[in-house]
Amino acid sequence: MLRRFYMLLLLLAVSSLAMAFKPGGPGKISFPGAYWTDPEPSGEFATLVIPIKRVSNLIILEAKVDTMEGNFVLDTGAPYLVLNQTYFRNYPHYNEQDAGGINGDAGVAFRTSVRNLDIAELHYDRLLADVTNLSAIENSRNIKVLGLLGTKLFSKFVITVDLFQNQLYIHKLNKDGEIPAAEQLYHDPILKMPFYYANNAILFKASVNDNQLWFAFDTGAETNLIDYRQAKKLLPTLQVINRSKLTGIGGSTFEVIYAKFEKLSVGERVFTNNKVIITSLEQMGKAYGRDIDGMLGSDFFGRAVFTINFVKKEFIMYTNKNE
């Protein structure tokens, strides 16, 4: 199954549009039928505070795999740890397959294991990982990227991302699955809602101009996306900004539309002045194991501090930190 390779195709294609607008995110692959055990984390902390930086709307933090330390993308669109084959090509190959994406340029990916993963004081032993080609991220952003940190790594924690202070918080939980009161940094949420967690993906319902859709929440996506099939009924309410043609395997072409829309309703919160890419998400739906109508990326989550409680399956947004 492919997730990020499809997004890479969008990134490369839409870069030809006249505006400085870069959708999509990193490339990755998963293996059909593969069984991935939950990583067992360790570390003596209540809350980790990790500096982050923004590179073209990607969330970058430093981590260490075995002896190699460097930049990783925080990516809730990735199911687990994904490594860049440029730096990990000599690791053991447990399984290998052709990872040709829609544009036929993804190469070969394989599954491997690493001895250690360290994110500050958070430590993992003997993790399985996918190794694949992430050079498109590096070339388009001019940054060295060792890999992607996906959702399963944080399945026992709450993470909070504050893009205004450039901080990632990783919280241990109490017996009720909550951040202990002494460690709670943010109060008075502007949005709090449950999400559906399937195939290591965060899914929830939201409405675009009063049309209810299923979205995947993806910190690796640099804008919002909506599938063509759903967009047909939305087009009369959208402001089309630009269009671009993509060419896929075998020479088939399809259109990508860049548009704006006024009203995005998530939970009980309404967000206005939204940007979106409209294209086919059929292959992305196959990767997630279910059809999705769209993806919510940086244009959505960049508006507030956000928290993901993977244990209670809650998504929360805040505006201010309680000093």
Image: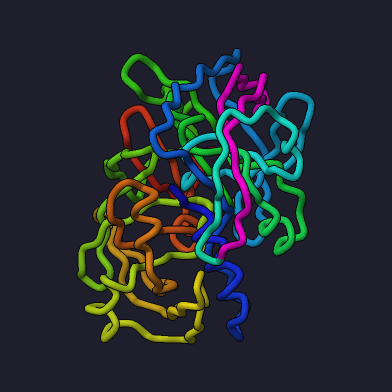
Residue 36, image quadrant: top left
Q: Is residue 319 left or right of residue 85?
A: left
Q: Is residue 94 above or below residue 243?
A: above
Q: Is residue 238 left or right of residue 81?
A: left
Q: Nearer the viewer, residue 267 or 77?
A: 77
Q: In this view, does 1 lie above or below 43?
A: below
Q: Is residue 258 visible?
A: no
Q: Give the range drawn in magenta.
A: 104-130
Residue 265, image quadrant: bottom left
Picture mark count: 0
What residue lies at 45% left-to-right and 31% top-to-bottom? 158
Task: Give the color scheme: rainbow, by chain, secondary structure or one colour.
Answer: rainbow
What residue lies at 46% left-to-right and 86% top-to-bottom? 241
Q: Is residue 165 above or below residue 264?
A: above
Residue 214 image position (x, y, % from top left): 27, 56
Magenta part mainly helix, strand or loop? Answer: strand
161 is within the stretch colored magenta: no
What residue lies at 34% left-to-right and 14% top-to-bottom? 175
Residue 278, image quadrant: bottom left
Q: In this view, does 252 lie above or below 106?
A: below
Residue 17 image position (x, y, % from top left): 58, 82
Residue 54 image position (x, y, % from top left): 66, 54
Q: Can residue 218 be seen in this view?
A: yes
105 is within the stretch colored magenta: yes
